[in-house]
Amino acid sequence: MHYAAQQEQSACLALLCSEEKIDVLTKNEFGRSILTEAIATGNGQIATIALEHGSATEERLIDGINKCSDDEEVIHKMFLFTNKDKNELPPLFIRELVITKKVDETFDSAAGDRTGLGVWSASLILARWLLSMKDNFMQNKKELTCIELGAGCGVPGLALAAAIPEIKVALTDFSEDALKNAKFNAEKNAQIYDWKGSIENNLQFENKLAVAQLDWFSHHQEIKQCDLIIGADLVYSPTLVPALTRTISTFTSDFFYVAPAHGRAGADHFLNVALPEAGFIFHHVEPAPAAFLSSPLTDNGDDDPFLLYFPDILTSSFLLHRFSKTKKTTVSSTTTGETVGEEDDGMKNSEKKNIIITEQQHHQDDASTVASGSL
């Protein structure tokens, strides 16, 4: 049942939940219940199936929340760095927490959003992608500033902080629970890496790290611009797109984004319409390569525990997007999807579509490579 919930197999999960003897609050060896897995998918239908089972009574849910303490957690040791860097850099330590809120509180508002308490596959892929480009980020720069939007546990931002001594990183989220966990992870790794200075709670980039609340729906005139913004799987509702696009446009001209290729409401409009209309061009887009899909939980690439925690790493398709804001005025056609007046190094929407069309086959080949252990 845990697997059915993870894979968002609604028919299978509903069939299994038709058995009265099933207990959706029973935890597996990783301390995660069927209900936790269902809510963690971000799929309201899956979560509702689990919540409507007879074992998920309000009394038991409230009792579980009252008993939830600091030991209801998993701390991952993540080996995200290359073979060369592994000899120089220790692993990251990342804590994720059990999601305990009811489904309506989890999805109905940003304030109640608890999804940032868990580590998501897209964030691992984003971290590896950014690390693969770390030597290019500092060209002609003495210092680099970066904001991670919807940071949650903060894996990509902390990975960059560890790999680039000259970078200053701000982990941002709206959820107070997510921010508390992000600060825990920031403090833990600051001790390991001996980062100097206190962890700020603003976006002024005075110290190495900041953990700050950021409301996409507010205006940000008094906040400094940064060199790049990073984000993983940020769009799950069309209502978020205008505010998210405005926030990105306000802060930076360089945006790195990783998300599943399918299954996110509002994502197509965000990538193909909203960002181009804000003056951004497709500088780069490609399927996540096999090297970014292997396990970071051990230094030998053992996938067994990894695939139990992150099964969608092989069953979903992920795309890497880089957007750059042009100096010229960019006009996006709402009929053809083509972008007019963009810089020469930009990627036209027609080129991007060709990549997406072939993406599924690339991903299947990459998944087969990972599964065979040939990395």
Image (tube, rainbow, N blue to C red):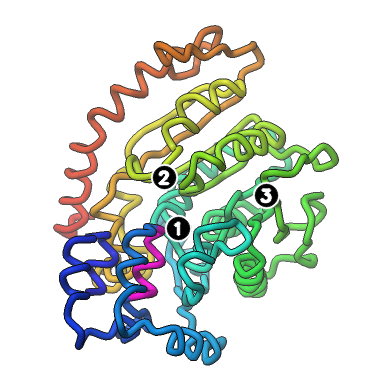
In this orientation, does residue 88 appear? no
Which circle's residue, 1 or 3, is located before the other in the chain? 1
Q: Which residue is mark 3?
A: 167
Compared with residue 265, is residue 308 higher up or lower down, i.e. above or below? Answer: below
As measured in the structure, the alpha-carbon distance from the residue carrying label 3 to the one carrying label 2 is 24 Å
Instruction: From the top left corner, tell me how far across and down residue 323 is, in percent.
Output: 53, 29
Q: Residue at x 62, y 56 (%)?
A: 161
Residue type beneath disc 3: Ile
Between residue 369 and residue 239, name the one nearer to us.
Answer: 239
Q: Give neighbour class at mark 1: few <14, some 14-19, many 20+ (Cα, 10 Å).
A: many
In the displayed structure, does residue 353 sit left or right of residue 113? left
Based on the picture, tell me whether residue 166 belongs to the magenta stretch. Answer: no
Label 3: state its secondary structure.
strand
Magenta residues?
A: 35-42
Circle 1 is placed at which residue position? 81
Q: Is residue 38 magenta?
A: yes
Question: SS for tag 1?
Answer: loop
Identity, as a three-letter code, of the amino acid under mark 2: Ala
The residue identified by callout 2 is 259
Say which residue appears at 41% left-offset and 51% top-offset.
Answer: 125
